[in-house]
Amino acid sequence: MGFAMRMQINNEIIKKDSYRDIYIDGRKHGFEFEVQLAYYRGHYLSDIELLEVCADGEKIPQEAVTFELNGKEMPIYKLNYAMTEFWSQVVPARIRVIKKDGLPAGEHELELKLMLRIPYMQLGPDHNFMPLDSGDRVRVTVE
Amino acid sequence: MSKIKLGATLFCYGTEYARYKYDFEECVKQAALAGAEGYEIVATQMIPSYPGVSDEFLGLVQRLKVQYGIGPVGYGANNDKGMRWDRNLNDDEMLADTILDLKAAHKLGCKVMRSQYMLSPAAFERLAPYAELYDVKVGIEIHNPETPCSPLMKQYLEVIQKTGSKHLGFVPDFGCFATAPNKPHWMKAISAGVNEEHLEMAAKMRSEGVDIETARERLMQAGAHPAINAALQGMYGFVQFRAKEALPGLLEELKEILPHSFEMHGKFHYLSEECVEPSIPYDEILAVLKESDFEGYLICEYEDELYCGGTEFTKRQIAMEKKILEM
């Protein structure tokens, strides 16, 4: 991958304390966490080029992941079209993951791949904009 | 005779804001404490209801104006030409989005809006009647590597002259007058293990007009630490610098567009305790401004590449401006 802007402006991108297991009918079947955009300004969700979640190195299927902002939960494929949903840089979004039996008790590595276009930094004449890497990797302890 | 007012963009406190150390109110309070008479708000950064201004946010802005004595005077717009995944926005779309920004600026009571060159000269021309209706003066930001009379900026000047509109103009950003390498980039490279000799070699090649690829190759051959790449990228990008001998010419360019300038952006990257910006020659720039007929805000803008927060630096910047301008 070529050069991507990375701005270490936040204390945390993935908010470690926000990690929660998700239960379906009383049984653990997934997890959720909050993420803050790592840039000085907010973006329309349509600026998101890539959003993937990996748990302990294993990629979660895209259909099992959603992105929730301001009480609106959407599948990842719809982010492309969310040109009117503005993600303020100080409002964390919630990523929800359905995973059968969830993550077992113990320590886990959680990785969020999150790439955006910086939509006012055009590189060259075409549809080519400065990439922004707002991804993160944290260790969480599941009880 | 110039009539200069001093302001600050709340962008100066972007690090504190992103880290939840300051909320919007604290940013306004700090700008007032630093000596700003008004502030610029970067809409995509601090308006919670962006792209609109909610009544709730307007109420907060008004309450803070009463409490701290300062309100928004400038609206920083982003022109997000790349917001679609499949293609660039066209002029019709860019214009429509910019009109939304005009509405927001108007609702906040900002008389000046700073726009970016992603808004084409043709769309800028079409903006004039709307800017007049809302009585908001829209200035295209002249940001390094552009200069006041670079070919692209000349296209905007032609539009301004052709329309004769008093609502279309410029917002020069003093970063475009840099005559030395960016200090934080230099500091970051050294702390990442880059040898200062290699940085000096890079700066020398840049000022001699060597292209970036050749410069990179020569640096690698000389055994430079790869972390030099970020600094090198800056020298050829948004924080590039020109030879000191080029400054008088650049200031002549500034004089040419000053009659069309609505606001100044006092960019700074670092200020020592003696209040000296190592790469941007403030004495010379402000001398031109002072002797001109410019009326409006000089908005200081700290670009926090060190992620140390802008509170102290913004105080120093306004103190420096007061000293040079003898205010």
Image (spheres, coloured by chain):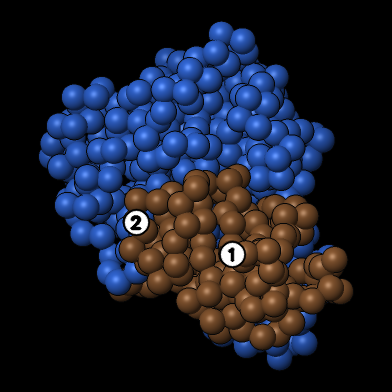
Task: Single out the residue that lies furthest toward the front.
Answer: A25
Task: Single out the residue that lies furthest toward the top.
Answer: B66
- Measure the alpha-carbon separation of dots 2 and 1: 21 Å
| Left or right of A59, for residue A51 | left
Q: Given the image, on which type of amino acid does mark 1 rest?
A: Arg
Label 2 environment density (alpha carbons within 10 Å; few <14, some 14–19, many ≥20): some
Q: SS at mark 2?
A: loop
Q: Label 2 is found on which chain of the structure? A: A
Counting the numbered discs, the total is 2
Q: Which of the numbered marks, if any, corresponds to residue A96?
A: 1
Q: Is residue B294 visible?
A: no
Q: Given the image, on which type of amino acid does mark 2 rest?
A: Met
Taking the spot 62% from the left edge, 13% from the top edge, the residue there is B68
Q: Which residue is mark 2?
A: A83
> What is the letter of the brown chain?
A
Colour in which chain B is drawn: blue
x, y (%) of residue B139?
A: 34, 37
| Left or right of B147, for residue B240 | right
Q: Is residue A108 visible?
A: yes
Instruction: Note whether A104 is above or below B253 in the view shown.
Output: below
The front one of A93 and B99 is A93
Taking the spot 66% from the left edge, 40% from the top edge, the residue there is B17
| Left or right of B139, for residue B322 | right
Taking the spot 35% from the left edge, 31% from the top edge, the residue there is B104
